């Protein structure tokens, strides 16, 4: 018995020392690799959050090497959490829309008329995120806006290849719009929404829906810090926020390459723009152009990127990124001009900020009404932290409430 106790004590001490070393390494990594501008809300709290994420990723790598589980599955496990308890104000049910998992949130209070419906597509770089990890966000929207919310659990990469994620989201959206009245929703009052890559998917789904003949158009789209193009990674926001947590410029390109199953050896070349041929530059330069970014967003520093030499090899590796199911900012004018009322949320300290600003201008130039909310002290992922215990951010709560106010105005 004493031997067992002794061995248990030694093992516990080894674990404590190991975790301490991992935590120390995470702090060193954060301090040496990240840049948190003074304008960010509660920079110390953001640094702690980033260190925790680094620790999770590092532990995931260790567990993968030990053969316990893959790094991706470990990260998913830590993010997923568990479904919250019953909500006194909502009926919550897990269903399938043509084999696509969804969670439907319906207000319990009776309504004299049919409600608006919100389709929510979660973020997570195509490889992470789930219905569970966005449960708080979807509950909040359903409760506060008194809407029916459908959270879509689309299949994740790399197990499921591009464009499976878009197809799942489109399938679930079409199913819900066709059966909206079964959930007490007015079929003419359906909003497509999402954050990060969920915002990308929401933009793509909206474009697909307005292209369908004899099919109802969504009432609105809500795009929360979406990524919308893969042509220019030297826009002002990519330069200013290249190392601001929780999303680095290299992480954006790395996720894109992993999602599209491309070799990481082309990452630097893609960042420099050698994958963009002259004809694509000429066609898309009208829309993906730093001149379309207001000057106020260049004040923190911006240097025009010098033209780079084109590479056929890099283009062949990355050309799928020019498809509009991946880069909806590049859609034809005939589609963009049909898009519904739009809400776009951007964050000042987010590499994807300028994608949102460019799409805002493109929509407005095409005659589409746009409501824009800019989180001046926000960073990528902040809405998911609106109710995150001691790691909550006020700017996330303000952003959530602004979205709710937009929904109520519809």
Image (spheres, grey):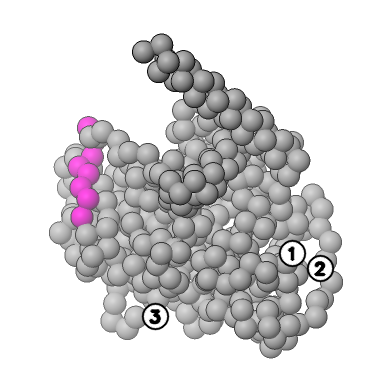
| Of 86 and 410, the residue lying toward us | 86
User: Is any atom of residue 382 visible in this view?
Assistant: no
Q: Are marks 3 and 1 in contact (CB under 8 Å)?
A: no
Q: Residue 365 placed where, x, y %?
A: 59, 72
Question: Is residue 360 or residue 69 the one in the foreground?
Answer: 69
Answer above or below: position of 109 versus 274.
above
Between disc 3 and disc 1, whose residue precedes? 3
SS class, disc 2 = loop
Indicate the secondary structure of the residue bearing disc 3: loop
Question: Which label sits on residue 305?
Answer: 2
Q: Give the main secondary structure of the magenta stretch.
A: strand
Identify the residue shown where x is 35% and y is 61%. 154
In the displayed orientation, state which residue is furthest to the bottom.
279
Would you place residue 134 above or below residue 95 in this image?
above
Observer-nearest of 251 and 170 = 251
Q: Magenta stretch: residue 93 in it? A: yes
Which residue range is magenta in the image?
88-95
Residue in the picture at 52% in, 49% down:
65
Q: CA distance from mark 2 to mark 1?
A: 6 Å
Residue 362 shown in magenta: no
Whether residue 173 sits left or right of residue 345 in the image: it is left
Q: Which is in the foreground here, disc 3 or disc 1? A: 1
Cα distance in 3D space between marks 3 and 1: 31 Å
Indicate the quadrant containing the C terminus: top left, top right, bottom left or bottom right: bottom left
Q: Which residue is mark 1?
A: 234
Circle 3 packing at 10 Å, graded few (<14), some (14-19), many (20+), is: some
Q: Residue furthest top?
A: 2
Q: Which mark is on residue 211?
A: 3
């Amino acid at each position: 018995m004493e031997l067992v106790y002794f061995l248990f004590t030694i093992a516990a001490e080894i674990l404590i020392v190991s975790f301490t070393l991992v935590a120390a390494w995470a702090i060193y990594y954060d301090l040496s690799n990240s840049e948190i501008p003074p304008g960010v809300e509660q920079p110390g709290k953001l640094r702690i959050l980033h260190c925790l994420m680094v620790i999770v990723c590092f532990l995931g790598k260790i567990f993968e090497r030990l053969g316990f589980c893959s790094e991706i599955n470990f990260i998913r496990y830590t993010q997923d959490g568990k479904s919250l308890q019953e909500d006194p104000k909502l009926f919550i049910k897990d269903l399938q829309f043509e084999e696509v998992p969804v969670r439907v949130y319906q207000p319990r209070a009776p309504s004299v008329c049919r409600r608006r419906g919100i389709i929510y597509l979660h973020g997570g770089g195509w490889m992470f995120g789930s219905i569970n990890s966005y449960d708080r966000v979807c509950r909040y929207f359903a409760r506060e806006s008194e809407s029916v919310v459908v959270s879509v659990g689309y299949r994740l990469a790399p197990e499921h290849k591009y464009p499976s994620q878009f197809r799942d989201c489109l399938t679930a959206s079409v199913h819900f719009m066709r059966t909206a009245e079964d959930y007490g929703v007015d079929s003419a009052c359906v909003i497509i929404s999402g954050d990060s890559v969920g915002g990308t998917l929401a933009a793509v789904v909206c474009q697909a829906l307005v292209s369908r003949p004899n099919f109802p158009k969504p009432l609105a789209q809500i795009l929360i810090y979406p990524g919308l193009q893969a042509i220019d990674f030297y826009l002002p926001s990519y330069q200013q926020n290249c190392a601001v947590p929780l999303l680095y410029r290299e992480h954006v390109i790395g996720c894109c390459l992993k999602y599209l199953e491309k070799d990481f050896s082309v990452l630097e070349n893609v960042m420099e723009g050698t994958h963009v041929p002259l004809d694509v530059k000429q066609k898309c330069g009208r829309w993906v152009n730093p001149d379309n970014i207001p000057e106020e967003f260049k004040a923190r520093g911006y240097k025009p990127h010098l033209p780079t030499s084109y590479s056929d090899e890099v283009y062949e590796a990355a050309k799928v990124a020019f498809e509009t199911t991946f880069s909806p900012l590049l859609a034809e004018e005939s589609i963009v001009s049909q898009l519904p009322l739009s809400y776009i949320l951007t964050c000042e300290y987010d590499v994807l900020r300028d994608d949102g600003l460019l799409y805002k201008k493109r929509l407005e130039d095409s005659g589409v009404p746009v409501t824009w909310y800019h989180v001046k002290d926000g960073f990528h992922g902040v809405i998911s932290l609106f109710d995150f215990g001691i790691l909550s951010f006020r700017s996330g709560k303000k952003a959530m409430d602004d979205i709710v106010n937009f929904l109520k105005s519809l």
